[in-house]
Amino acid sequence: MKRPGMRAMLAYMEAQKGKNYVVIFDDLKRFARDTRFHLELRSELASRGATPECLNFKFEDSPEGKFIETMMAATGQLEREQNRRQVKQKMMARVEAGYWVFRAPVGYKHVQAKGGGGKVLVPNEPLSSVVREALEGYASGRFASQAEVQRFLESNPHFPKDTKDGRIRPMTITRLLKKVVYAGYVEAPKWGVSVRKGQHDALISFETHQRIIDNIEGKKRAPAARKDYNVDFPLRGFVACKCCGNAMTGAWSKGCRKHYAYYRCETRGCDAKSKSVPRAKLEAGFEEIMQRMAPSRGLIEIAGMMFQDAWALKEQTMREERAAWKSQIKTIDSEIENTLDKIIEAENKSVIRAFEKRIEKLERQKIVLSEKVSGVLPDRHTKSECMELSLSFLSNPWKVYKNGGHAAKQTVLRLAFQEPLTYCPKEAYGTPKFSFPFKVLGEITRAKKEMVL
């Protein structure tokens, strides 16, 4: 039995054996849902000694009565399949027209379109901003893995959770990252509807969506979130043991009267294995390194001028690339036409499917290039905003790290250092390798000191 109500009724009859039941249906078509269901239900009722009754039909155990029941079941099945086909055709037509006909994804909601024409998706704040940040963060590398996206969304009170304890399943994260609807496009692969421009506003650019897909396909599987994740140890996994090179872990140890926080190396055979380092000591040394990174006011002014020069160079490069993108679009159009001609000539289904996948890939490339040329989705941040954010980080990375959440701390670590720090319980931190911006500012500072000397 596929219908939950019928299963519950039959289970109750099974538990109450020895009693005679009369099952009353208000409509024969509802009883004779379809031919297979009708025969199965009749058999289940007969095995339990139950008698079916109907308000608009009299059951007869005769060839004529069975024939009428079968015809009614077949008629009901035909009507349902016709309705299903009609609904499917209407939904396909709306998808082809650029409308999202399925359940509204997280970050959107359905509203009635102005002037009729059904419902259309619109951003649903503040969820849309949260989803945009998660998608752009994963595409740009701010979130290095899907596990970090998962932790970011779990820490946000607005994002809906999958479990009562506030957790989000990894599959939910993967599905969210793969949805092309967030880029302003719609598709229905199961109906053969390829990617096309939607009637709703996008949260991210199609180029950003394509980077997300490339990141996902570049990994064998989505990394699961660490079960031992703890905000009490933000440097766990980033600071490595100097003796063996493996990442140090952090945990609480129970003392006589209270708990104590320690970092330690747990690698077998390491000379520093299980040698606990108080959290305060290790993080105090890290704070000292971060505070030394803050350049002088003069260097910040130099960095600002370098930023403006880089921005101007990027604008010039973009103008030159625009012409190249237009040429690439023409090349892709020509390749699509040639592939379509090959599909017409091909007879092998496997070859046709390969050509269709090739066309889909080319269409995605064309969308990205067309988006770049037309600039339908310009950067949300202006030059002054980007410059302000960048210089704010460069002037005091420790402040950003100290006042930010776990996701912000992890971002600062990736932006400030070229590779993880090394730590030895006896010698403290090794020589840090800073990222390119801090490395350049440091070289400028050393050059000035040498000139003064």
Image (cartoon, rainbow, N blue to C red):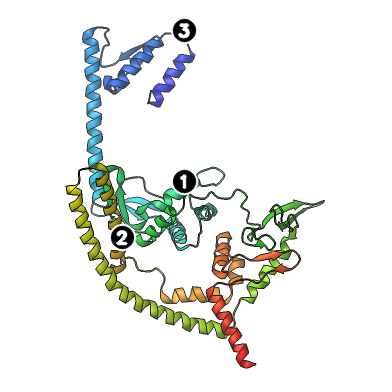
Q: Which residue is mark 1?
A: 171
The type of residue carrying mark 2 is Gln
Q: Does 248 appear above or below 315?
A: above
Q: Earlier in the sequence, mark 3 or mark 1?
A: 3
Does residue 372 sit above or below 156 in this rendering?
Answer: below
Residue 78 showing in the rendered view: yes
Q: Report the side of 124 relative to 293 (left or right).
A: left
Q: Nearer the viewer, residue 323 or 105?
A: 323
Residue 153's spot in the image, x, y percent?
51, 53
The residue pinned by badge 3 equals 18
Q: Residue at x 25, y 65 (%)?
A: 329
Q: Could you tell me which secondary element the residue under label 3 belongs to?
A: loop
User: Can residue 26 be seen by looking at this rendering?
Assistant: no
Q: Amino acid at mark 3?
A: Gly
**Numbered tag placed on residue 365 in the rendering:** 2
* Mark positioned earlier in the residue sequence (3 or 2): 3
Q: Amino acid at mark 1?
A: Met
Q: Please tell me how crowded label 1 is: few (under 14), some (14-19), or many (20+) other residues with Cα within 10 Å.
A: few
Give me the C-alpha separation between circle 3 and circle 2: 69 Å
For the residue pair 292 and 428, the one nearer the viewer reads as 428
Point out the frontmost of discs 3 and 1.
1
Which quadrant does the N terminus fall into?
Answer: top left
Q: Secondary structure at mark 1?
A: helix
Instruction: State yes or no: discs 3 and 2 in contact (Cβ < 8 Å).
Output: no
Indicate the quadrant where residue 33 lies: top left
The location of residue 428, given as percent across then percent down, is 72, 68
Residue 72 on image: x %, y %: 23, 19
Left/right placement of residue 345 relative to residue 50 reads left
Q: Classify residue 420 as left or right of residue 330.
A: right
Considering only vertical position in the picture, is 53 above or below 277?
above
Q: Secondary structure at mark 2?
A: helix
